[in-house]
Each structure stands twice: as structure tokens, then as C-alpha cells.
Image (tube, helix red, strand yellow):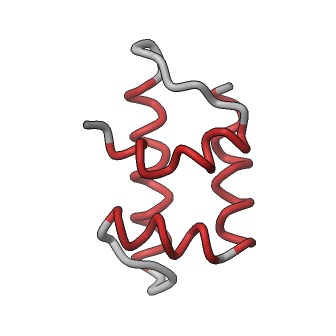
Amino acid sequence: MGCWRWFNKVLKDAGVEVTDKNEEKVEELIHRYIGEKASYGQCSSDWRKAQKQIQANLQMRQELVEKLKPLA
């Protein structure tokens, strides 16, 4: 299972449909975003916890949506 599956709502907001062609890029982008935020202490490095934190934080959610839009 791809880590991106926990972010389906964010992907939908960004207009991104995950395919075999872009799955790796989606996972890489989400991984980088979570790693960056975790290094600043803004969210957990655990994907499941990070997903909940990003869903609850409108600013972080919007940042991730904007980063994902080019993959649409």
C-alpha cells in the first residue's frame, strides 16, 4: 500500500489522481513535505499521525495541496 493513500482527501483537493505513472512522484513529494515539517517540529514523522495533523491544520493542508497540484 502506498503511503499516499492516507492523503486521499488532500490529493482530491489538489486534483491529483494517483496512477502507476505518477505514484512514485506523489509519494516522494508527500514524504519530502512530511520530512520537512517534522524536522521543524510542526508534525510527526509517522505518516498516519502526520496525515491527521495536516488534515487538522488548514495552512499545512493548503501548502501540501499547492505542492501536489503540478502532478495533476
Point out the residue furthest to the bottom here. 41
Q: Which percent across, then down, holds residue 46?
A: 30, 69
The quadrant of the image that shows the N terminus is top left
Q: Which percent across, then down, holds residue 70?
A: 70, 31
Image check: 50 left or right of 67?
left
Q: Which percent across, then down, holds residue 30?
A: 47, 49
Q: Residue at x 38, y 28 (%)?
A: 24
72 shown above or below 33: above
Q: Which percent across, then down, holds residue 43?
A: 46, 79
Across the whole image, how many numbered discs are drawn on residues? 0
Image check: 54 left or right of 52?
right
The quadrant of the image that shows the C terminus is top right
Looking at the picture, tell me which residue is in the foreground, 71 or 1.
Answer: 1
Looking at the picture, tell me which residue is in the foreground, 56 or 41.
Answer: 56
Q: Residue at x 71, y 40 (%)?
A: 14
49 shown above or below 6: below
Q: Residue at x 64, y 41 (%)?
A: 68
Q: Residue at x 40, y 14 (%)?
A: 20
- The quadrant in which residue 17 appears is top right
6 shown above or below 61: above
Point out the residue furthest to the top here. 21
